[in-house]
Image (cartoon, grey):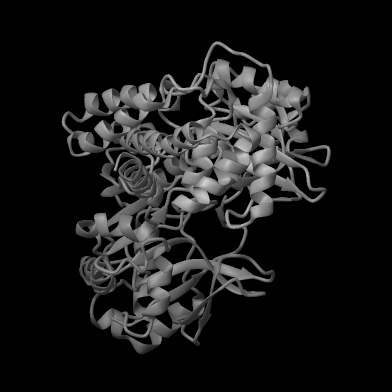
């Protein structure tokens, strides 16, 4: 069947079932052409008054949409602050949850087989199964792989299938029971965006795809894959499993790179006021005015209370790459940038926010961290002033090392005393207990390393190095060297009365200094207080604090975080320094 005949039959079907909301219409010219060629009547597909016959329905059967897959696994980090509290698809737009609107539109088109691929905060979607009868597939690697992995997990569902995103909002229902060919929806955009642009031929077949052009047809909204397209796409996706080139890419990139070898893929144009995709909170505010005055967000309420402002005064949200412990975003009030810290999962079991607040107040008073504005001791969120013009220290720079050492000496020499503090050996043992509680025996292979660290700890326990007020997390990302030469030290979650070896040692650990560079750093820190006993103490704490962070990383991964290469580096440094000092 050619496309011309399909459009006539499909339009007649939609008329038959009362679909007045479909965004496709048959023109009078189409109808006249079909009458003139006579084939549509000869085949008894349609009556002379335009009614679809039983034969016409049978002719459409091969174009029937089997199902829909809605991708809803991502964390939508650009949609801060709302995405920190719930997945983007669950936010209400004009009183209706985005994903529920999409499910209802699919069902209205006769698409009842609907599968959601879930990851981030997946439990918040569970109510949809009972409410709408949808099915779930779980993507446990949503934070390390992009949506090609979600489609691979849903490979058994890919047939004649709608591929949808949970955050797409359609003014009118774009879905139909029958689709003629594989396509991606979109519209003409006269401005430069970060979306994927396509060039098409006279039949709207996509002939090239390019990211971020100045203007043109952009891909946005839903897509439809026929069986041939689904099968060929999966061939490429499965082949890439061994290599992982597309692990961090959207599925459109795989199509772009293999466009010539895939079955024909078409651009289906809509008006720009029919399809919306809310990548940023500000876009949602523009579309739905209720979000200007109140977003019903706890985070926004907190910021309002701290600054005694209206919600509409809080603007210009920007995501900050997720840290090892927390997630943060930037916002602006009255032209001034601030940063909001959102605590990571599981951190409440290993970090006292009450103690952190005390340390932040002390650090601000000392002038070591003047950025602090407010922190909440119950839920762990924090607001700070954003520092723009700064750089992190270079581990290879002796000048930068001297700046760091100067601040560490200032901090350690202060007479401040508190009743809390990091105990890396004891704390690591407690985290090991938490780890094995969830996964018995998971630590057995590291017991040899633990024994070596315990031996070093016992040798340093009663020497002449005394506890003092420490930071506890002195890797380079917590240092700011400003343009005026001043040096700041931020993020005080692990601070308190501790062994100064944790501050000196962790800078060495993250720099991955060899033994000679480590000793040089320690000797400059000790200055006139140098002794062989103290040098051994601080060298031992390189191993001890590396071990602490290694166990911490194992625990964080058991809570769902991804620690990556850092976990192995901490393990490697702990082993290296422990073996060197013991032997």
Name the foreground residue: 156 vs 75. 75
Residue 96 can be seen in this image: no
Residue 439 can be seen in this image: yes
Name the foreground residue: 431 vs 111. 431
Residue 434, by quadrant, is top left
The spot of residue 206 in percent (x, y) is: 45, 80
| Above or below, 461 relative to 340 | above
Name the foreground residue: 507 vs 333. 507
Name the foreground residue: 424 vs 234. 424
The spot of residue 179 in percent (x, y) is: 34, 67
| Above or below, 259 relative to 294 | below
Name the residue rendered at 38%, 74% in the picture: 255
Quadrant of image for the N terminus:
bottom left
The spot of residue 104 in percent (x, y) is: 40, 43
Residue 43, by quadrant, is bottom left
Name the residue rendered at 36%, 26% in the picture: 459
> How many numbered marks does the figure carry?
0
Q: Seen in the image, is 299 located left or right of residue 174? A: right
Residue 125, by quadrant, is top left
The spot of residue 494 in percent (x, y) is: 52, 27
Q: Residue at the far top: name it.
A: 419
Quadrant of image for the C terminus:
top left
């Amino acid at each position: 069947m050619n496309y011309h005949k399909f459009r006539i039959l499909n339009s007649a079907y939609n008329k038959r079932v009362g679909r007045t909301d479909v965004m496709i219409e048959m023109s009078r010219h189409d109808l006249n052409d079909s009458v003139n060629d006579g084939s549509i009547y000869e085949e008894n597909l349609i009556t002379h008054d335009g009614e679809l016959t039983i034969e016409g329905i049978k002719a459409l059967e091969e174009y029937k949409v089997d199902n829909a897959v809605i991708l809803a696994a991502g964390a939508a980090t650009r949609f801060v602050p709302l995405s920190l509290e719930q997945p983007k698809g669950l936010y209400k737009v004009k009183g209706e949850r985005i994903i529920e609107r999409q499910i209802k539109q699919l069902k209205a088109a006769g698409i009842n087989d609907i599968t959601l691929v879930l990851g981030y905060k997946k439990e918040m979607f569970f109510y949809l199964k009972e409410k709408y009868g949808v099915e779930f597939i779980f993507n446990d690697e949503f934070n390390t792989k992009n949506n090609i992995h979600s489609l691979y997990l849903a490979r058994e569902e890919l047939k004649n299938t709608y591929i949808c995103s949970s955050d797409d909002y359609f003014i009118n229902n774009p879905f139909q029971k029958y689709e003629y060919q594989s396509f991606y929806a979109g519209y003409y955009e006269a401005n430069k965006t970060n979306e994927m642009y396509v060039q098409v031929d006279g039949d709207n077949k996509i002939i090239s795809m390019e990211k971020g052009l100045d203007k043109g047809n952009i891909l946005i909204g839903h897509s439809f894959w026929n069986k041939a397209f689904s099968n060929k796409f999966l061939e490429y996706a499965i082949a890439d499993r061994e290599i992982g080139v597309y692990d961090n890419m959207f599925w459109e990139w795989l199509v772009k790179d293999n466009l010539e070898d895939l079955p024909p893929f078409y651009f289906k144009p809509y008006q720009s006021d029919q399809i919306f995709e809310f990548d940023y909170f500000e876009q949602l505010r523009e579309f739905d005015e209720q979000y200007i005055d109140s977003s019903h967000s706890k985070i926004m309420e907190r910021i309002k209370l701290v600054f005694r402002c209206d919600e509409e005064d809080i603007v210009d949200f920007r995501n900050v790459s997720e840290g090892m412990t927390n997630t943060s975003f930037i916002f602006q009030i009255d032209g001034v940038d601030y940063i909001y810290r959102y605590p990571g999962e599981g951190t409440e079991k290993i970090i006292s926010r009450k103690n952190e607040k005390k340390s932040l107040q002390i650090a601000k008073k000392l002038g070591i961290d003047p950025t602090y504005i407010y922190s909440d001791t119950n839920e762990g969120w924090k607001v700070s002033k954003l520092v723009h013009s700064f750089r992190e220290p270079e581990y290879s720079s002796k000048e930068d090392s001297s700046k760091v050492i100067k601040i560490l000496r200032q901090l350690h020499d202060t007479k401040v005393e508190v009743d809390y503090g990091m105990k890396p050996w004891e704390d690591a043992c407690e985290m090991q207990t938490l780890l094995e509680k969830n996964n018995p025996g998971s630590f057995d292979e590291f017991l040899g390393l633990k024994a070596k660290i315990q031996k070093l700890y016992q040798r340093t326990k009663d020497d002449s190095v005394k506890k003092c007020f420490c930071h506890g997390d002195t890797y380079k990302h917590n240092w700011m060297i400003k343009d005026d030469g001043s040096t700041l030290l931020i993020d005080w979650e692990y601070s308190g009365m501790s062994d100064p070896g944790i501050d000196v040692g962790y800078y060495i650990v993250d720099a991955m200094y060899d033994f000679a560079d480590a000793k040089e750093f320690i000797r400059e820190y000790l200055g006139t207080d140098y002794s062989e006993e103290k040098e051994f103490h601080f060298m031992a704490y390189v191993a001890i604090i590396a071990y602490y962070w290694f166990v911490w990383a194992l625990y964080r991964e058991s809570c769902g975080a991804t620690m990556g290469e850092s976990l192995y580096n901490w393990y490697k440094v702990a082993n290296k320094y422990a073996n060197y000092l013991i032997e």
